[in-house]
């Protein structure tokens, strides 16, 4: 099942090029949820409500995907985690241009995800594909990083690799937008709009092996990142294990799995087109911040 959020906080099931409105179910789930729950109520309720969602979609009238503004597929993640340096070829391309990363001299951390850990992007950086990215520092280099993203389905701590897939509700695509420079990663990657997510969530049953997924981003029509999750250094299960060594994950939490090689600079006026045959496609426009 493909679940999207769109327009004024509506929930829909995506079938082909059509969205079937099931917002009434979203209203019911939210009305029963405790305000102080950790995580997103709709994602937490998926196991219980999924069959009803499918049935409601059968009877709901559809609107074309092209006629709506898509929002991020999760309304209230408790956190947005992101893996740095998780593809060997991306590690190499960044090491070759220290003037871009800003990591010249000083107390440089040892490289490798096992040493650098997972970082957090601000939840307030999340946007849907329709909102686009506003470049906040046009005088600095701003890069796109297209990434395969996990949506956590249930609470877990110290999750073992063998059990990790049980904790994933679904998958989506993300752009880990980045201002290059010397500040801490999470600061540079948390500007408003620097975490586009979409076009929707694909439930985990549709991608039984998340370590076997192709995805791409074209910048202004030119293929820029052409990736396969088999090349992840820490694969999907290991990432869940690693993250939960440090913190508890909650339904709706997002985990960006890391950027493949091919990152490049974006400027206002550019369009980033992300695609994955198992998920879908999204075009994200870049503009200048006000
Ligand atoms: Mn990244």
Image: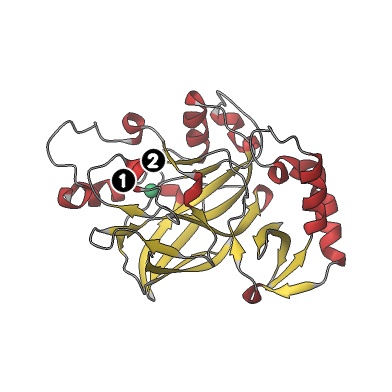
Q: Which corner quadrant holds the N terminus? A: bottom right
Foreground of the two, 33 or 160: 33
Q: Is residue 80 visible?
A: yes
Image quarter where the C terminus lies is: bottom left
Is 211 placed left or right of 65 in the picture?
left
**Label 1 residue near ligand 1, CB within 8 Å:** no
> In the image, residue 88 lies at what x, y percent?
31, 45
Residue 284 position, x and y percent, is 47, 67
* Quadrant of the rendered image containing residue 73: bottom right
Residue name at image x 62 percent, y 42 percent: 252
Q: Which residue has dot 1 on it?
A: 88
Residue 10: give x, y in percent of width and height: 71, 60
Looking at the image, which residue is at 19% across and 33% down?
108
Tag 2, which secondary structure? loop
Q: Could you say where residue 157 lies in the image, as x and y percent from the top left?
A: 58, 25
| Circle 2 Cα neighbour tier, 10 Å, few/some/many (<14 / 14–19 / ≥20) | some
Q: In the orientation shown, which residue stands out farthest toward the left?
A: 105
CA separation in Å, label 2 and label 1 = 7 Å
Q: Are marks 2 and 1 in contact (CB under 8 Å)?
A: yes
Q: Residue furthest front?
A: 290
Image point (37%, 41%), residue name = 186
Work out whether residue 160 or residue 218 is closer to the camera in this orientation and state it. 218
Is residue 85 in view? no
Q: Is residue 227 above or below residue 101?
A: below
Numbered disc 1: secondary structure: helix
Q: Nearer the viewer, residue 280 or 121?
A: 121
From the image, tell me which residue sits under label 2: 233
- Mark earlier in primary sequence (2, 1): 1
């Amino acid at each position: 099942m493909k679940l999207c959020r769109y327009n004024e906080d509506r929930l829909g099931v995506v079938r082909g090029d059509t969205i079937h409105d099931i917002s009434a179910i979203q209203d019911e789930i939210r009305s029963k949820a405790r305000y102080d729950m950790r995580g997103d109520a709709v994602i937490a309720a998926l196991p219980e409500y999924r069959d009803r969602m499918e049935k409601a979609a059968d009877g709901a009238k559809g609107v074309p995907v092209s006629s709506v503004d898509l929002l991020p597929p999760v309304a209230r993640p408790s956190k947005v985690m992101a893996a740095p340096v998780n593809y060997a070829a991306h590690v190499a391309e960044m090491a070759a241009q220290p003037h871009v990363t800003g990591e010249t001299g000083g107390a440089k951390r040892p490289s490798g995800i096992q040493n650098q850990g997972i970082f957090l992007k601000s939840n307030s950086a999340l946007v849907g594909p329709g909102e686009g990215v506003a470049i906040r520092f046009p005088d600095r280099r701003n890069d796109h990083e297209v990434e395969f993203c996990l949506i956590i389905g249930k609470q877990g701590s110290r999750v073992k690799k063998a059990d990790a897939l049980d904790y994933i509700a679904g998958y989506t695509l993300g752009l880990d937008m980045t201002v290059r420079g010397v500040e801490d990663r999470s600061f540079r990657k948390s500007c408003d709009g620097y975490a586009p997510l979409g076009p929707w969530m694909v439930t985990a049953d549709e991608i039984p092996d998340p370590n076997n997924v192709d995805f791409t981003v074209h910048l202004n029509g030119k293929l820029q990142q052409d990736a396969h999750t088999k090349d992840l250094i820490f694969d999907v299960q290991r990432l869940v294990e690693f993250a939960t060594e440090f913190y508890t994950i909650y339904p709706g939490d997002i985990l960006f799995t890391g950027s493949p090689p091919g990152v490049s600079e974006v400027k206002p006026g550019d369009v980033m087109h992300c695609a994955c045959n198992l998920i879908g496609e999204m075009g994200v426009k870049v503009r200048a911040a006000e």
